[in-house]
Image (cartoon, rainbow, N blue to C red):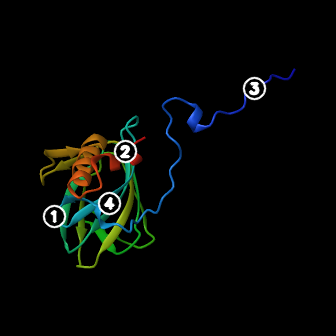
Amino acid sequence: MDIALPPPATALQVPGVIPDMAFPAIPEDERVWVPERDRVWYRPLMFDTVGGGWTILLRVRRAGVYSRHRHPGPVHGYTIKGRWRYLEHEWVAQAGTYIFEPPGAVHTLVVDNDDEMIGFFFNVCGITVFVDEQGNTTGHEDTFTRIRMAREHYARVGLGAEFVDQFIR
C-alpha cells in the first residue's frame, strides 16, 4: 500500500526556520571581526540559540598566552593559518591541523610568534568556562554573551547591531 506524502517543505514555508547560510568565511571587511580580548578577535559564522553552541573563526595577532579554559561539551577545531598550541600538550597546531577538545579538559591557548594566526574554525558545543591556575572559574562565555558582544561591536563600527542577526539560528 502506497502512502501519499506531501511534498517536502522548504525553509521559507516552515514558520521559524531560517534559510541556509553560505558566505565567505574570511571576510573582506575588517569590521566583521569582533574584538574578544587584547590581540584576539572572532568572526561569527553561526550562533545556535537552541543547542547553545557557536561556530567561529578565531584570529590572534602577536605572541602570548590567551586563555585557560574548559568546555562542558566537545569542541572541534581546524587551523587555517599560522601556528598555536596548548600548554597542556606536546603538539603544535599548524595550517591543516584538526583538533578535538573533550568535554571538561582544561586548555591554555598559546601563540609563540607574532605571525597572524587564523585558527580555529571552532565549533563549540556549549559554553566556555575560563579558569585560573588552580582550576577556579573566573568567567564564562556562551552563545548569548557572544551575540551581545558582536551586536555591540557591529553597532559601534557602523555595520548596525542587527548585522549579527544573519548568524543566529
Query: Element under label 4?
Result: helix
Q: Determine crowd level at label 3: few under 14, some 14-19, many 20+ residues with C-alpha closer than 10 A.
A: few
Q: Which residue is mark 1?
A: 38
The structure residue drawn at horizontal position 37% and vertical position 44%, both measured from the top left corner, is: 165
Q: Which residue is mark 2?
A: 165
Horizontal relation, residue 108 to residue 73: left or right? left
Badge nearest the viewer, 3 or 4: 4
What quarter of the picture does the C terminus occupy? top left
Q: Which residue is mark 3?
A: 5
Horizontal relation, residue 80 to residue 15: left or right? left
Query: Element under label 1?
Result: loop
Q: CA distance from mark 3 to mark 1?
A: 55 Å
Badge nearest the viewer, 3 or 1: 3
Q: Are marks 4 and 1 in contact (CB under 8 Å)?
A: no
> Residue 130 at x, y = what percent?
19, 49
Query: Element under label 2?
Result: helix
Badge nearest the viewer, 4 or 1: 4
Q: Are marks 2 and 3 in contact (CB under 8 Å)?
A: no
The structure residue drawn at horizontal position 34% and vertical position 69%, both measured from the top left corner, is: 118
Query: Element under label 3?
Result: loop
Q: CA distance from mark 2 to mark 1?
A: 25 Å
What quarter of the picture does the N terminus occupy? top right
Q: Name the amino acid type tagged 1.
A: Asp
The residue at the far right in this view is: 1
Q: CA distance from mark 3 to mark 4?
A: 43 Å
Q: Are marks 4 and 2 in contact (CB under 8 Å)?
A: no
Q: CA distance from mark 2 to mark 3?
A: 34 Å
Q: Residue 108 falls in which quadrant of the image?
A: bottom left
Q: Which residue is mark 4?
A: 32
Q: Nearer the viewer, residue 133 or 96?
A: 96
Q: Determine crowd level at label 2: few under 14, some 14-19, many 20+ residues with C-alpha closer than 10 A.
A: few
